[in-house]
Amino acid sequence: MTDAQLEGIAAQALNLARLDLERGKFNFLVACYHDGRGLHRMSTLESDINAKLGEGWLNSGETKDAAFGLFRFCVDILPPDAFIFVSVGNEFRPTAKLLALDEAKRLEIIGAGHDRHHRAVAEGLMTVRDVLQAVAQTPTQVCLRRQPCTPRGMSLDEPPTTRMMPQDRFSGRLKMYGDPNAQTLGVPPQDDRRDPRR
């Protein structure tokens, strides 16, 4: 699969999620892609996850472990050509105040967890905004596509951004191919997703 094809799949999934968001009924989207059969949204799995774990499952480490473990189990047994997950998350960006800090302090804050990033926002070191984000991945490649959003839909003031990376540089719960615990470079802090999504 080419990068352009993977980006197209991510864009398609993002648009499906956008429609749900505009209708006021979006929690998350999970889909798979098989060459020649297109994108398949796993609506039954989404409903089952919400019913068993609760709609707030993305806010708990224990329920995230359970859901992403199930997704990974499915991918391991019947590997799709691509796996896609879409959610709303936080995007943190550095401010001039953060950039003025010495490199060690700056890297310490950037590399910290979600709670520290929110404290950095309160301290004026970072800004935060909500984004609708799609992660589409194959055994070798990951596409991160995101668009700023509001509770009722995507912002049209800013186009979506797309970032491609090799699968071996991606880590965390959302990693469906390879070792999710491998020591990798991971997603850089400027692309940090809300902690519940990692």
Image (cartoon, helix red, strand yellow):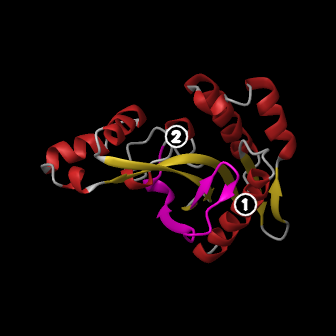
Q: Which residue is drawn at 64% across and 68% down?
A: 6
Q: What residue type is labelled 2?
A: Arg
Q: What element carries label 2?
A: loop
Residue 50 visible somewhere in the drawing = yes
Task: Identify the residue at horizontal 17%, vertical 42% (top origin).
Answer: 105
Q: Residues in magenta?
A: 147-171
Q: Determine which quarter of the picture holds residue 104.
A: top left
**Which amino acid type is marked by label 1?**
Ala
Specify few, some or many for label 1: CA neighbours under 10 Å numbering under 14, 14-19, or 20 or more: many
Measured in 3D between alpha carbons, the distance from the residue under mark 1 to the one under mark 2, in whole angstroms, is: 19 Å
Where residue 90 sits: x, y (%)?
Answer: 50, 46
Residue 194 rendering spot, x and y as whole percentages: 51, 42
In which quadrant of the rendered view does residue 145 lie? bottom right
Does 134 appear above or below 111?
Answer: below
All told, the count of numbered labels is 2
Verify CB contact (< 8 Å) between mark 1 and mark 2.
Answer: no
Nearer the observer, 47 or 76: 47
Residue occupied by mark 2: 198
Q: Which residue is drawn at 79% across and 40% down?
A: 46
Query: Dot 1 corresponds to which residue?
Result: 13
- Secondary structure under tag 1 reads helix
Q: Within the magenta stretch, is there residue 3?
A: no
Mark 2 neighbour density, 10 Å: few (under 14) some (14–19) many (20 or more): some
